[in-house]
Structure formats: C-alpha cells, structure tokens
Amino acid sequence: MATMTTRVLQAIDRFHSAHPWDHNAHYHRWIMRQVPRRFDRALDIGSGSGDLARLLATRATAVQGLDADRAIVAKARELTDPAVPVTFTAGDALTETPPGPYDVITCVAALHHVPFAEALTHFRRHLAPGGTLVVVGVARAESPGDHLLGAAAIPLNIVMAWIKNKGRRARRPDSMTAPTRPATMSFAEIVRDARRVLPGARLRRRLFWRYTLVWHQRPGGGRTHPPRVGR
C-alpha cells in the first residue's frame, strides 16, 4: 500500500507542478481563527514570501517574520508595503530568533526542517504568558488512517487546483519557491513528542497532507485549556 501511495503522490506532484496552488495558504484563515482578534507581537517561523505575516499584521501591533532562505526573505520585503508593521529577518529558527516574548507564534510547513521537540521547546520559551502557538505541519504517512486521508485528499486537490487556476495561466506562487524537504516523523510520533513538550496541545490530521497543532500558554507560564475558537 505504501508503494502505491508513493506512486500516487509522485503523480500528484507532477500534476501540481502543472497546476500549482498553495496548500499552506489554504490554512491561513483557519490559523486566524485560532488567535485573538487583537494582540501585541507575533512571530511567524518559516515566513516565506510573507503572506501569513501580513495577515497577522491586520491584528497585531508588530509582526516578526523569520525564514532561513535569504532569497525568499528578500522577496517578502519586496512584496510588503512599508506601512505594514512587519519585519522580515533571515536566520535559523532555533539560534537566531529575534528576542520575544510573543503573544502569537505561527509555524507553517517549517517544523519538519528542524529538530521537532527542540523546536517546540524553543517556541514555548519565546511565547508570552497567555500566548498562542499555532502549527500547520507535514507528517510522514504511516498508518492506514494516514493513507486513507491522503487518498481522500487526491480528488479534492485536483478540484482545488482547477478552481485556483481557472481562467488564468498557471503560475507558481511566490510562497512556493522556497526549498522543501520530506517529513520524517509520523503523525503518531508528532503527537507523542508534542504532548510531552506541550501538555494539553490539540493536534489533528488535516486534508492536503497536513496536521495542525494549537497550544495556549497559561498566563502564569504553564499550559491552559481556553475555549476553542475554531476547528
């Protein structure tokens, strides 16, 4: 089954190259439902071309975008109006994070590029009391449930690609030009390690080969269980 899934995913990659659309941007509105309506400072890890950072800036006093790819950071600066309160920095997520604390930290499709537990511990330290961490990540398909959800996403992926590219020449979004690498951790491993570092974290498998993680820092510095503001 794994071999068949690999072949199907390779075919999807070829189709996606010809009909590109940003799977990560698909979750931006969901991310915004997880964060407060107004907050002070935000940090977007793996900020890419800056789409999410600029979206966060509609609610934040200041947003810091951080990405290891200097070329994509330069592109993000070019695409951002100087009046928007966003600063983009090129640097390593674990060693060159601009000083916090941050009320909101987001990380989309970047966590599998760094040591997982170490990164979550690092994010937790930079999160302000009462702050929110939101992750949209990529996991390695392993269980029957993983493969089933991946299979269910295939026709939806084709439909979305057709909708996104309908009536215009297919163009690879700026957000999809940064280097990528395959995920090495399964969803089960991610859940295990995440809940050890961030007790009470909410994790879910998602369509389009993604998972989500939401964690709220207790005002006193520990975990908390605030009301769910989105699904």
Image (cartoon, rainbow, N blue to C red):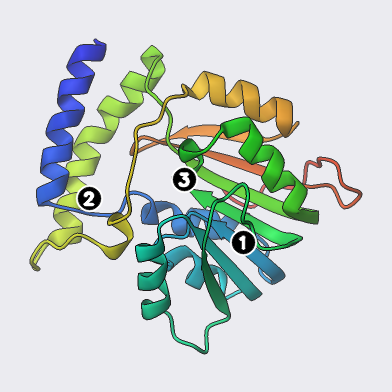
10 Å crowding of disc 3: few (<14), some (14-19), many (20+)? many
User: Is residue 194 shown left or right of residue 167?
Assistant: right
Tell me the distance, in whole angstroms, between the alpha carbons under discs 1 and 2: 29 Å
Residue situated in front as seen by the camera: 58 or 84: 84
Q: Which residue is mark 3?
A: 110
Determine which residue is flagged by label 2: 160
Which residue is identified by label 1?
A: 43
In the rendered view, tell whether residue 52 sits above or below residue 212.
Answer: below
Q: Residue at x 15, y 63 (%)?
A: 171
State the CA–CA distance, disc 3 to disc 1. 13 Å
Amino acid type, mark 2: Met
- Reading the chain from its start, which is encountered first: label 1 or label 2? 1
Q: Is residue 158 left or right of residue 33?
A: left
Q: Quadrant of the C terminus?
A: top right
Please tell me which residue is depicted at 63% across the width and 31% down the height of the picture.
117
The location of residue 152, given as percent across then percent down, is 28, 29
Element class at badge 3: loop
Mark yes or no: residue 68 visible. yes
Q: Hey, what amino acid is under mark 1?
A: Leu
Q: Residue furthest right?
A: 220
Q: Amino acid at mark 3?
A: Ala
Q: Sequence order check: which comes first, mark 3 or mark 2? A: 3
Q: CA distance from mark 3 to mark 2?
A: 23 Å
Towards the viewer: 55 or 78: 78
Tell me whether circle 3 and circle 2 mark residues in contact (CB < 8 Å): no
In the rendered image, the vertical position of residue 187 relative to residue 32, given as above or below: above
Residue 168's spot in the image, x, y percent?
Answer: 9, 68
Q: Residue at x 53, y 50 (%)?
A: 107
